[in-house]
Amino acid sequence: MSSVLFDRIALIGIGLIGSSIARDIKESGLAGTLVISTRSEATLKRAEELGLGDLYVSSAADAVKDADLVIVSVPVGSSGMVAEQIAANLKPGAILTDVGSTKASVIAQMAPHVPAGVHFIPGHPLAGTEKSGPDAGFAGLFRGRWCIFTPLPDTDVAALERLREFWIALGSKIDEMDPEHHDKVLAIVSHLPHIIAYNIVGTADDLEAVTESEVIKYSASGFRDFTRLAASDPTMWRDVCLHNKDAILEMLARFSEDLAYLQRAIRWGEGDKLFELFSRTRNVRRSIIEAGQDVDAPDFGRHALDPKS
Ligand code: NAP
């Protein structure tokens, strides 16, 4: 068990990410008191049933009173509204952070509401699954994963250090970058793959007759991995697309260009070009495994389905 890092932590939003943070805080004893708030009574009740916090408060504004650390874990399109709701009750000297998947937009939405004397440090843990809601979270989600801070130019060094300590206690590795750079990097490593997955699964779904039979039946052969990504939370991903528009459009343009190259190589039977690309991409996979970002087990590290279960 780690020691208490903050006397009072308030979590606003208790879905996959919020509830995973809550479980880690509880397990490691990082907070004197853990206060939980979320938009709907049903989710708040579920969080209480799961025993995720110490106090459960309907109003986000009430929840942040006296909190030393406030973590906002809501879809990025709602972060401005939450900041507006809680601003007046934030304690001077408190740290306010978020976990949103886009950073420039979250900063633009939240920063104008943050009162002087409150340390706003935007963050993004690069960890998650395709599931959502408080039941989906689990302790250890952030272990060995990167958490990226995008601090504002005048960020208090001591506050940054305290937040760093918090995420390290959750097992994360910390990096810092400016928000625009973060949004570009994430557009290619996370946002584009999700958009491609939504698109391919949508295309298959349009082929209705096929979807109902062969696509489902034979889905072990590649399509299944896309369906996992394409099952991600629609609200979260709608917001990511709307709030990282420029970087996503730039990556989509590059992707389309490269796809046209591939299309041409296939049309003209240019096997050497195909082989060269597929060899290069295989090396990327190898590098990811060497960097400890995935395991070298077949089936992308997931357990094979047990035919008996
Ligand atoms: P989630 O499981 O869908 O949970 C979202 C939470 O936000 C719920 O507690 C929900 O409350 C609340 N919420 C939704 N709309 C709200 C609003 N308008 N005002 C206040 N609360 C609202 O989502 P999540 O996966 O935890 O994602 C939370 C954040 O983490 C997002 O910004 C996402 O970009 C980021 N993130 C996600 C992942 C991932 O893989 N999922 C990874 C890294 C970062 P109710 O249920 O009460 O409505």
Image (spheres, rainbow, N blue to C red):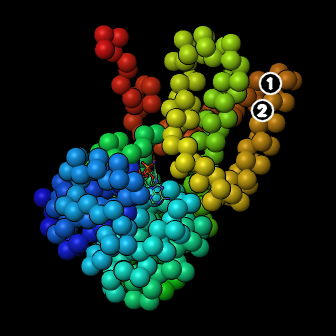
Q: Nearer the viewer, residue 134 or 248?
A: 134
The residue type indicated by label 2 comes to Leu
Q: Position of residue 81 (x, y in %)?
A: 52, 68
Which residue is most to the right?
A: 268
**Residue 37 at what x, y percent from top left?**
33, 61
Q: CA distance from mark 2 to mark 1?
A: 6 Å
| Left or right: residue 32 compared with residue 136 | left
Residue 160: x percent and y percent? 37, 77
- Amino acid carrying label 1: it is Ile
Q: Is residue 249 left or right of residue 218?
A: right
Q: Which mark is residue 296?
A: none
Q: Is residue 166 visible?
A: no
Characterize the local packing of mark 1: few (<14), some (14-19) or many (20 or more) Cα atoms within 10 angstroms.
few
Q: Residue at x 23, y 72 (%)?
A: 8
Q: Residue at x 60, y 67 (%)?
A: 105
Residue marked by disc 1: 266
Relative to 295, is 83 above or below? below
CB-based contact (under 8 Å), mark 2 and mark 1: yes
**Is the C-beta of the residue carrying label 1 under 8 Å from the nearest atom of ligand 1?**
no
| Pointer 2 residue | 262
Q: Is residue 41 visible?
A: yes
Find numbered disc 2 in the image and state the secondary structure of the residue it sits on.
helix
Say if disc 2 is inside 8 Å of ligand 1. no
Q: Tag 1's secondary structure?
A: helix
Q: Residue at x 53, y 50 (%)?
A: 236
In the depicted structure, whether residue 6 falls above or below residue 37: below
